[in-house]
Amino acid sequence: MTALPKLSELTVSEKLQMMESFVWHGKILIQRENALRQGSDHFSAWDTAKANIRKRVCIKSKKWPKALNHP
């Protein structure tokens, strides 16, 4: 993970970009929270999510990528 620079080292433009990014991220989190409450979204266990990703990658490429370390 990359460390963020000190605010004093950023230009005004960079500071504004960071603030916009935080606002955008906050909106996405609120949307996800609302979807979870309404039952239209859910969380998956990490092992389940990895297995689903592997299946999709394998189906699209029609072979198992070495990087995914398939058993």
Image (cartoon, rainbow, N blue to C red):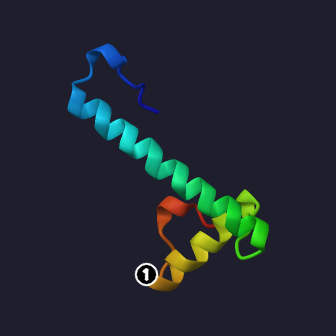
- Disc 1: CA contacts within 10 A as few (<14), some (14-19) or many (>=20): few
In this view, the residue in front, 44 or 33, is 33
Residue 41 % position (x, y) = 70, 72
In this view, the residue in front, 9 or 60, is 9
| Rendered-image quadrant of the C terminus | bottom right
At 48% from the left and 80% from the top, the residue drawn is: 63
Determine whether, in the image, residue 5 is placed left or right of residue 47: left
Quadrant of residue 40 in the image? bottom right
At 78% from the left and 66% from the top, the residue drawn is: 37
Against 63, residue 45 (above or below) is above
Question: How many labels, in total?
Answer: 1
Q: Is residue 71 at least partly visible in the picture?
A: no
In this view, the residue farthest toward the top is 8
Q: Is residue 53 at least partly visible in the picture?
A: yes
Quadrant of residue 4 in the image? top left
- The residue at which mark 1 appears reads as 61
Residue 64 % position (x, y) = 51, 74
Determine whether, in the image, residue 8 is placed left or right of residue 50: left
